[in-house]
């Protein structure tokens, strides 16, 4: 298999094939009856190798695997309302689990899913609530969200800073931590299931000495990871083994939205709450225009995400008369 394609305009045995995604077996070829692509048609036609007729190579496009629905995972029977309810339920679980980590009832959680679906937002909102009470009462803040790259030594310092009970450190999009052997071994100590969790830094470090950080301490806090990685798809067996060991010590919440429909409904769901476009002072008609524009151009946008909705909203605010043209130039894939 050579990836996935969306056939925009084609046919199979005189049946029209329009806007359908297939696993690609072989790229465009010319036959005696015209052009065709060879795909796995199991999901739609019940055959694993079929030739779909297309007039030109431009009648199909390469797409990400996430846009393909396998026969086993297809949810066409679900209504939009049922999908929204299913997605909302998972994000409510995220809120409840975050509160449990903040309260010290749960030690660690991994939150996985594609970028731009709101993983970080829900967790950050819960952290801000807890930190607000600490600030108002003059107490030390007990949680922090660390974003981006982090070294093993930097992670050790962060774990020490939030090593007290009911303290939480959140690593947001710090995927380098989950791919580093030293970081992973430190985490195994921090997330160990025994009553006493001891973390050690056995290498000499002037940085630790200058900051008064010991080379060993008891960790009583909580840890949350927010990641785009799919643990079961890592190529390195060694890395998979490490991640399996980490995952066995954590609660794992998968917020993957498998289809374009799921992603668009997630955007509609957040827009309906008024939170998505709260900073733009749009009326309801303007908000609906943005969401409908995303629906109409879903196959052209670089990604279907909350971030993309914000980008288009920025253009709607800055260029009220030509925001759609601006979006076509800056937010869409070039054909």
Image: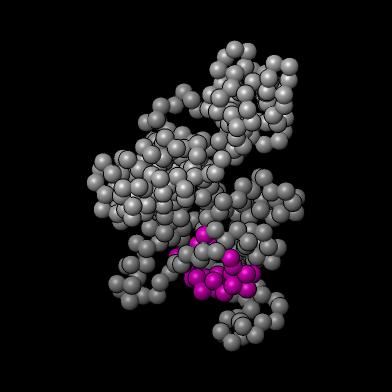
Determine the image quadrant of residue 209.
Answer: bottom right
At a point 60% along the width and 35% down the height, the residue shown is 61
Does the segment drawn in magenta span residue 101? no
258 vs 92, left or right, is right
Task: Depth check: give the residue in front, 81 or 54.
Answer: 54
Outermost residue toward the top in this view? 14
**In the figure, 315 relative to 137: above or below?**
above
Task: Depth check: give the residue in front, 38 or 23.
Answer: 38
At a point 63% along the width and 55% down the height, the residue shown is 246
Any part of residue 270 in sight: no
Does the segment drawn in magenta span residue 166? yes
Measured as percent of width and height from the top left, residue 184 is found at 66, 62
**In the figure, 137 relative to 128: above or below?**
below
131 vs 284, left or right, is right
Determine the image quadrant of residue 45.
Answer: top right
Measured as percent of width and height from the top left, residue 142 is found at 43, 69
Give the magenta-colored segment's residue range.
Answer: 149-172
At a point 74% along the width and 51% down the height, the residue shown is 236
Any part of residue 234 in sight: yes
- The quadrant the C terminus occupies is top right
- The quadrant the N terminus occupies is top right
127 vs 136, left or right, is right
Determine the image quadrant of residue 180.
Answer: bottom right
């Amino acid at each position: 298999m050579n990836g996935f394609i969306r056939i925009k305009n084609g046919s199979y045995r005189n049946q029209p094939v329009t806007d359908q995604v297939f696993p690609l077996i072989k790229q465009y070829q010319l036959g005696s009856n015209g052009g065709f692509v060879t795909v796995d048609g199991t999901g739609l036609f019940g055959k694993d190798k079929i030739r779909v007729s297309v007039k030109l190579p431009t009648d199909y496009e390469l797409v990400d695997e996430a846009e393909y629905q396998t026969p086993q995972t297809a949810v066409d029977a679900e209504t939009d309302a049922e999908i929204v309810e299913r997605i909302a339920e998972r994000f409510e679980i995220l809120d409840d689990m975050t509160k449990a980590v903040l309260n010290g009832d749960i030690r660690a959680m991994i939150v996985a899913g594609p970028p731009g679906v709101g993983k970080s937002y829900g967790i950050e909102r819960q952290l801000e609530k807890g930190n607000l009470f600490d600030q108002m009462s003059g107490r030390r803040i007990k949680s922090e969200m660390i974003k981006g790259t982090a070294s093993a030594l930097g992670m050790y310092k962060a774990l020490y800073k939030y090593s007290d009970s009911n303290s939480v450190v959140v690593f947001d999009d710090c995927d380098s931590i989950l791919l580093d052997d030293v970081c992973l071994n430190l985490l195994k100590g921090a997330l160990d299931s025994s009553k006493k969790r001891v973390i050690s830094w056995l290498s000499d470090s002037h940085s630790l000495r200058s900051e008064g950080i010991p080379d060993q301490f008891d960790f009583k806090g909580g840890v949350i990871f927010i990641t785009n990685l799919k643990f079961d798809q890592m190529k390195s067996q060694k890395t998979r083994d490490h991640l399996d060991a980490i995952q066995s010590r954590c609660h794992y919440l998968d917020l993957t939205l498998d289809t374009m429909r799921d992603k668009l409904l997630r955007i509609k769901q957040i827009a309906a709450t008024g939170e998505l476009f709260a900073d733009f002072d749009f009326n309801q008609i303007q908000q609906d225009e943005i969401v409908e524009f995303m629906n109409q151009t879903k196959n052209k946008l670089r990604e279907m995400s909350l971030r993309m909705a914000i980008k288009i909203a920025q253009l709607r605010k800055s260029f009220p008369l030509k925001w759609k043209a601006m979006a076509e130039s800056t937010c869409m894939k070039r054909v």
